[in-house]
Structures are given as C-alpha cells and as structure tokens.
Image (spheres, grey):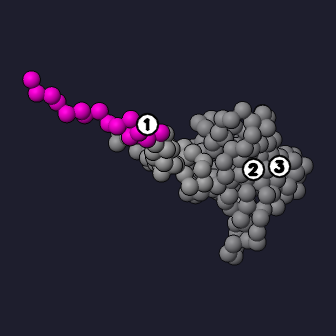
Amino acid sequence: MTQLPNTRPARGARYASVALAPLFAALALAACSDPAGEAQPPEAPAPTAPVAPENMPPASPPSAGAGETVGGDGSPIVLNGLTSAEIDAAGLSGELACAFVGEGDQILLHATGVVASSDPAQGVVKVGDYVERVGAPGGFDGMLRGASFAGQGKTVLIEVTGAPIGSGESPPNPATLTYQRADGASRVFNGLWNCGP
C-alpha cells in the first residue's frame, strides 16, 4: 500500500494563516469604505417626471378677469358677460348708463341713473348664470368716477385707474371691478369704465 504524502500544512503556516485572516478582512473593509470614515447611504433613484395621461381633458379656459378669487369659503367668483336681452329684461330706470367692460368685450356690470338726482343708480351683474341687481348712491353723477354698488350678499366696487382713452363725448377710462362676497371672498377684474348716453 502506497502512502500518500502529508498534505497538511506545517503547524506554523497554519497559525500564520489564521492570524492573518482578520487583517485581510479589515483591509477589505477599509478598501470599500468612505475615505472620511463615514458610511454613505445608498443613492436614491432619480425622480421621474410625471406623465400626463393621454386621455386627460384640456384645461378649461380662464373666466373673464385678471385676478383669482381670494378668501371666503374657497369657491371661485365667476362673473359672466351680460347680453343685451338680459340688460333689457332687468328694466333699469335712469336717463344715462355706465358699463364695466372686461376681457373679450364682456359687459360685467351695467347700471343706469338719473342726472343730478339723489335717487340711487340701478345696475345688474351676472354671477355665474344668474343676473343679480345692485345699486349705488348718487344717481348717474355718482357713477362717473367710479362707484360702490351693493346687492344681496355682495359689494361691487368700480375704481377708475387712468385717464380717458381716446376722445369724444364720453371716452372710456381704465378701471378695476372688485367683486366682494359676504363670506369675505373677493376678486379683481381689469377693464374699462364707460359712462354716457
């Protein structure tokens, strides 16, 4: 029977490999660590941009006016243009009229009054789909340079903001219409204030 050569390492070599094992492990960890000695958290994946669904409806067009509704219960203030039929149906009394014309030549407020009278001017606005009445003190003369109209649950302030545009008997002035709701909400509309025959 043949005798196999002794494959066991020498006793000293065996102890050397056992003693060096922790050193090799420490070197391996040092090579993988941060040079400052602080562990780095794994990198988060880069965020992806949201993708809009293909069947998403287009954004609705903005309503007339330059500003957004501020305050109140959060519901928007929407004023729509008055038609000539709606103005006629209101039956406003007075000799002369004033109108606030907003974006797209929409009449957002129409009012009439009597010259040199203390009787209040009468007006209408269209809030959403409803034509609602408002009034202002001082008749026609009280509306010439702007006015404060009041109605149920609302105040409508007209403020002239610039010199007349153009010439003629009654040129329009740049102006703002501020609609204030009873719940504290308000919205400002830019446009023209025009008074005359």
Decide whether residue 7 is among the magenta residues: yes
Work out which quarter of the rendered image holds the N terminus and state it: top left
Query: CB of mark 1 within 8 Å of CB of mark 3?
Result: no
Quick one: 20 or 166, which is closer to the camera? 20
Q: Residue at x 77, y 64 (%)?
A: 161
Q: Quadrant of residue 104?
A: bottom right
Q: Amino acid at mark 1?
A: Tyr
* Residue extending farthest top: 1
Crowd band around label 2 with a 10 angstrom C-alpha radius: few (<14), some (14–19), many (20+):
some
Whole-percent x, y for residue 39 in the image: 57, 45
Crowd band around label 1 with a 10 angstrom C-alpha radius: few (<14), some (14–19), many (20+):
few
Find disc 1 in the rendering and name its residue.
15
Q: Amino acid at mark 2?
A: Thr
Quick one: 92 or 36, which is closer to the camera? 36
> Does residue 174 appear to the left or right of 145 in the view shown?
left
Q: Residue at x 76, y 69 (%)?
A: 162
Which span of residues is magenta-colored?
A: 1-19
Q: Is residue 66 visible?
A: yes
Whole-percent x, y for residue 168 in the image: 69, 74
Q: Amino acid at mark 3?
A: Ser
